[in-house]
Image (cartoon, rainbow, N blue to C red):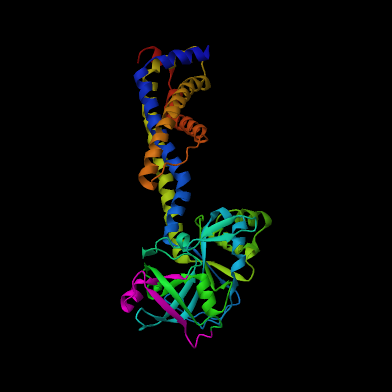
Amino acid sequence: MFFRIVGDSFARKPRRKALTALALALGMAVATATLSVAMDVGDRLAREFRSLGANLLVTPQADSLPLEIGGVDYRPVNAGAYLPEGELGKLKTIFWRNNIVGFAPFLEVPIEAQRPGGSAAGATTLIGTWYKYAVPVPDGTTFTTGVAATQPFWHVEGRWFDDGAEQCVVGAALARRAGIQAGDTVELRAQANSGAAGESSAKLRVTGILSTGGPEDEAVVAPLATAQKLSGHTGHYRRLLISALTKPEDEFARRDPRTMSGEEYDRWYCTAYISSIAYQVQQALPGVEARAIRRVAESEGRILTRVSALMWLVTLAALVAAALAVAATSATTVLERRSEIGLMKALGAGHALIGAFFLAEQVLLALLGGAAGYLLGVGLARLLGKSVFGVAPTERIILLPVILALAAAVALAGSLVPLRRAARFDPAPILRGE
């Protein structure tokens, strides 16, 4: 009997009910779109941020006091500690191995460069690294990495060198000063006071001119093996840059893991904080110190936090707007049905039955509006994703029950005030037509 009454009521005043369902549909469409984008925004932005460069720096724990100017290490080549190149594949065995986008080792060697024609180009630095190097992983696979992954903003006019070949790229400032062009051959000699124990010189073909806006513009960048030969440190490097997808840090992420309980440690370890990834890097590569490049990591964290907060704020605003629209239509419906409410009360209906009558109607409208809003929201999310990130967010069917539940909650929240008013109606004046 109750459901028949609800069904009859639902069939009346279809225009007003359509407006309620439309308000819910629009609110749920915005909520679906923003939730879809918000669930993907962290990963999408984290990948976009990797174009800004590496966010982790790895150096030897036992290293001597560094002497860096403009990011280039000017210590004698035989000073300080070195790290074994052969262990780098272990980075792809840590818990967050899939978040390691790339890594590149570096070895700086003070050199004197001789330009074409035999004239000296002056003292400079040879930076040995990888461009796209296949690193063997302990599980038998290989991982291709290098500055192509960690420093994608470095621009080369011409082309990069081939790892393992007698080739190099020359910094733009050095190339202008020395008159070096792509296709030339330069001779590099380890400086006499560098303490190098390897081969004293190497002839490399210039494959391109490098522009970074940093100290590399005054240097020669070549395969790591070339720098190792000139320095006499075959199979070793001095510092490592890692590019990793991370989650913005909060107060919990900054805590010392040694002070955490077992449960807290597991939660921290299994969250992609930059601090937890750095900790796992130190576990995989004994004898290293891994620390975040704060300027990059903190900027990423602030932007991710603000964008996520904006998405949730838009979602909340859409839900509040939908609740206000439902409240307005519910209030009008209650006023229009004063006579029905009065009659039901006169026949003995209690507040619970009257409330259930109206709430059942609102829930039905919420389910219809929520389903329609979900379908509209999926299309809106694709449009937003493609316009902002160039790719649509992942469709998650799990959002459908969430949206339906939100629609029901919004409908019920918007109906509370009108229902309280309906509960206070006195049937006698209503039935007398007052």
Residue closest to the far right: 262
125 shown above or below 326:
below
* Quadrant of the snapshot with the C terminus: top left
- Percent of width and height locating residue 23: 37, 29
Residue 406 is left or right of residue 61, and the answer is left
> Can you see residue 332?
no
Q: In this view, does 425 lie above or below 105?
A: above
Q: Is residue 237 visible in the rendered structure shown here?
A: yes
Of 268 and 171, the residue lying toward us: 171
Residue furthest to the front:
117
On the image, which quarter does residue 78 sit in?
bottom right
Q: Residue at x 35, y 76 (%)?
A: 174
Query: Is 178 included in the stretch rendered in magenta?
Result: yes
Residue 282 in magenta stretch: no
Examine the rendered structure and indicate whether residue 132 appears above or below residue 23: below
At which x and y percent is residue 373? 41, 31
Residue at x 48%, y 66% (from the top left corner): 293
The mark total stands at 0
Foreground of the two, 212 or 305 = 212
Image-quadrant location for residue 271: bottom right
Q: Tell me where residue 187 sits by quadrant.
A: bottom left
Q: Residue 34, percent across and down?
A: 42, 41
142 left or right of 431 in image: right
Q: What span is colored magenta in the figure?
A: 166-195
Closest to the observer: 153 or 416? 153
Rendering coords of residue 219 (x, y %): 41, 75
